[in-house]
Image (cartoon, rainbow, N blue to C red):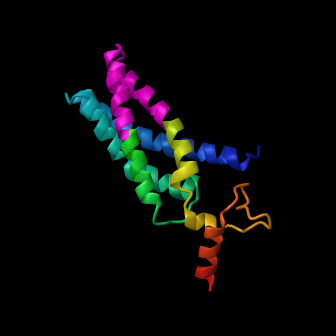
Amino acid sequence: MVLSPRLRQVAAFLVVGSLSAGIDAGVFLLLNSLGMHPVLASCLGFLSAFAVNFTGNRRVVFQARSSRGQLPRYIILVIVNFCLSAAIVALGIALGLSPVAAKVVSLAIIAVVNFIAMRQWVFRSGSEDAAQPRHPSGSDGDGERRDDDDRVGEQRLGE
């Protein structure tokens, strides 16, 4: 069975995400079982998966070349997800879910948010877009037109 490039990307994302989620959940379960407050345990579990998730998604899932903007964008996404994770776990517990169930809900929501944000924003930098072949129509090849300022800047760089 041959998978389309999009399905391979989703499958790779799920593998990297599962590894990261395993690290996240494992740290959460360990710390929670040792008596740490569930929200704090959730936060520490989330942060523990940071390097695995960034590297795996950049290299394996999105096969992005390294660029200056990726890490800052990823850090912004992590901060948003960090707050979202803590809020979902706290809300889940307040609504009567067990800490583990609340954490599972947070992982599912964050997985969807991450795939979209990483694909559309984190691993799509201006330098990578500029390196893509240009179509005669002036688009990047993905249907998006680039404005004249981009072309002028690229011509200056190429001179």
Q: Residue furthest front?
A: 148
| Left or right side of 69 for 144 | right
Is 122 included in the stretch rendered in magenta? no
Rendered position, 124 above or below 33:
below
Q: Quadrant of residue 90?
A: top left
Q: Quadrant of residue 126?
A: bottom right
Q: Residue furthest left?
A: 35
How many numbered circles are shown? 0
* Residue at 53% in and 36% down: 112
Residue 137 is at least partly visible in this image? yes
Q: What's the magenta bit mostly, secondary-structure-wise? A: helix
Rendered position, 143 above or below 28:
below
Can you give x and y, in whole percent of width and height, for residue 132 in the image? 67, 67
What span is colored magenta in the figure? Answer: 82-110
Can you give x and y, in whole percent of width and height, for residue 158 in the image? 62, 82
* Residue at 36% in and 24% down: 100
Is 103 included in the stretch rendered in magenta? yes
Can you give x and y, in whole percent of width and height, for residue 63 in the image? 58, 59
Rendered position, 61 above or below 157:
above
Choose between 92 and 49: the one closer to the eye.
Answer: 92
* Residue at 58% in and 47% down: 12
* Residue at 50% in and 66% down: 66
| Left or right side of 51 for 7 | right
Q: Quadrant of the C terminus?
A: bottom right
Q: Quadrant of the N terminus?
A: top right
Choose between 10 and 156: the one closer to the eye.
Answer: 156
